[in-house]
Image (spheres, rainbow, N blue to C red):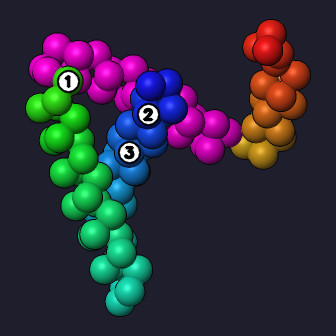
């Protein structure tokens, strides 16, 4: 189930990032636009399915957790290169005990 939760988080990331792209005014062209729209459609459908399957309360908790994780990833991408490199070095030193 843990892998499935990770997958659901990445789907949420696609939706949040895709929404930013949709409203940025940037024009996607040709095949990229077709794949982008298809991906967004399928991710939205998957999320609707999850909400129906999990129930409203659990789905909201998942959304909160996943949105927080996605926000953290966005912050990493927005770091200046030196800070990001130091941050990633620090994270790579973390040992989860396995």
In the displayed structure image, the side of residue 67 where residue 80 appears, left or right:
right
Residue denoted by label 1: 54
- In front: label 3 or label 2: 2
Numbered badge on residue 11 = 3
Magenta residues, start to end: 55-79
Question: What residue appears at the point 35 percent right and 56 percent down from the top-left corner?
Answer: 18
Residue 12 horizontal/vertical position (percent): 36, 40
User: Label 2: how many residues lie within 10 Å, few (<14), some (14-19) or many (20+)?
Assistant: few
Q: Is residue 89 magenta?
A: no
Our reading of the magenta stretch's main secondary structure is helix
Residue 24 showing in the rendered view: no
Quadrant (top left/top right/bottom left/bottom right) for the C terminus: top right
- In primary-sequence order, the first of circles 1 and 3 is 3
Residue that badge 2 annotates: 4
* Mark 3 element type: helix
- In the image, residue 58 sits, relative to residue 87, either above or below, namely above
Would you call the spot at circle 3 few (<14 residues within 10 Å), some (14-19), or many (20 or more)? many
Which residue is nearer to you in this view: 89 or 51? 51
Residue 74 sits inside the magenta stretch: yes
């Amino acid at each position: 189930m843990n892998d499935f939760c990770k997958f659901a988080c990445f789907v949420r990331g696609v939706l949040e990032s895709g929404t930013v792209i949709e409203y940025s005014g940037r024009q996607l062209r040709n095949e990229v636009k077709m794949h982008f729209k298809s991906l967004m459609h399928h991710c939205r459908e998957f999320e609707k399915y999850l909400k129906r399957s999990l129930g409203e309360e659990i789905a909201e908790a998942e959304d909160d957790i996943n949105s927080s994780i996605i926000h953290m990833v966005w912050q990493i991408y927005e770091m200046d290169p030196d800070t990001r490199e130091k941050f990633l070095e620090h994270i790579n030193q973390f040992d989860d005990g396995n």
